[in-house]
Image (cartoon, rainbow, N blue to C red):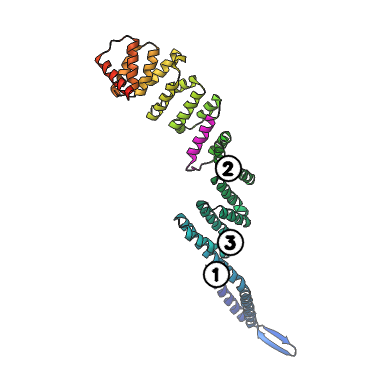
Amino acid sequence: MKSFIKMLVLLASCMGLLWLGNYYTGSVVVSLASYAIEINLAIAIIGLILIFMALHYVLRLIYSIMKIPANYKRNKYHNQREIAQQQLNLAFLSFFEYDYEKTLEYTANILKSEATSEDKFMAYVLDYKIALKLGDAEEIKKINAKMQETQLPNYLITSRFLYAEYLYNIGSYEECLILLSDLLELTSKHQFIYYLQMKANCKLSKFNDAYDLMKLFSKSSSINYPDLDLIQFAIIEGVFNNTQDTNQIDKIYQHLTEQQVNNPPYIRIYLTNLLRLNETNRIIKFIKTSPNHDAEIIDIVLYVVDKLMFDTLDSKQLESILNYLQQAGENNVIALLLSTKIKIQQCRFAEAKDDLIKAQNLDLNIIQVNLMLLKLAEEINDVPSPDMSSIKNICSKSENQ
């Protein structure tokens, strides 16, 4: 399109000059000292145009010659940047392939070249990660100092966080927290700072501080860190184990996600800590409202029920436990034994005997079942049957062993 417009302008100029030459026969007189030159008007105009064009191209040539050094530097810079980026790309590929020797060779080439500060900083990051994996403390400190010397404001947070991560890895949790607190004064939008703070507080057994950070982190972060679930569990377990406030335990448990509430480890720490604090009513409430009958969860609940003092419970509480034990299934020996204990306490001997016989049918060699059958027989003055004789033999053999 531009070429077409130029052709139109040139054609219009030529036609204008022809028209001017046909209708205006005037001339131009150029006087130089004692000489005078008379030139046709059209030729004079063409000459001026040619002189203007010549001056234009001469000036462009001079400008291009003057730009040669700058162009050379710019091309050299771009070539070096391209080579540095290629080396950096190869360094990252070697790092991900666990070929640390090649990675260090590529990063050394980058640091020796006239690469940009950003490329050099990325090379330092790779060197830092390798030193961290190799556990070279001196090299880590040296590289950290060099990263600080780059004086790149955009990368200051990265370099400091890397060093905080190193302090965490070597167990200097207090120093790590101090450095992370300084980082929060620079920025508060990077969630990985809160994440590392949470982990460090957990390692220092500052579980309440870690839990506050965990709530903040969970609300504002969508990143799914690989070990986040384990850290959250460790924090909640630490809070539960170190508190005497059952209301705090209940409040935290109620704020858990549905997945966590149905997770056996969370149920275990919740119930065992209620048991530690003698919160029988809360345990009974959990048993009454628990809809989950997963085998692992049932084992946890049965363990907690076994630790309860049945003689301190009222009839309603005992009935709630019995209902749960019946729902646990007739194929669970532990549930049948616990049911037997409660029914013996309630003087429901016939039902207790039925439960024990069911347990015995599941596994004849369980000594606890056999002993309870003998005890029950003695309490109700039951006449020993052939089955009872075999039970006595099993019990006597176990005592001899």
Q: Closer to us: mark 3 or mark 1?
A: 3
Q: Where residue 76 sits: x, y (%)?
A: 57, 69
Mark on residue 116? 3
Q: Residue furthest top?
A: 381
Whether residue 71 is in magenta: the answer is no
The residue shown at (53%, 38%) is 218
Residue 373 lies left or right of residue 222; in this view the side is left
Q: Which amino acid type is marked by label 3?
A: Thr
Q: Which amino acid type is marked by label 1?
A: Ile
Secondary structure mostly seen in the magenta stretch = helix
Q: Which is more N-terminal, label 2 or label 1?
A: 1
Residue 217 higher or lower than 309, as above or below: below
> Is the C-beta separation of discs 3 and 2 under 8 Å?
no
Q: Which is more N-terminal, label 2 or label 3?
A: 3
Residue 23 visible in the snapshot: no
Mark on residue 173? 2
Whole-Å distance between the Cαs marked 3 and 2?
A: 34 Å
* Magenta segment: 222-241
Whole-Å distance between the Cαs marked 1 and 2?
A: 73 Å
Residue 73 visible in the snapshot: yes
The residue shown at (44%, 24%) is 304
Q: Where residue 271 sits: x, y (%)?
A: 47, 26
Considering the image in quadrants, where does the C terminus appear?
top left
Q: Which residue is label 1 attached to?
A: 5
Callout 1: SS = helix
Question: Which of the 4 image quarters holds residue 388?
Answer: top left
Q: Nearer the viewer, residue 82 or 41?
A: 82
Q: Which is more N-terminal, label 1 or label 3?
A: 1
Q: Which amino acid type is marked by label 2?
A: Tyr
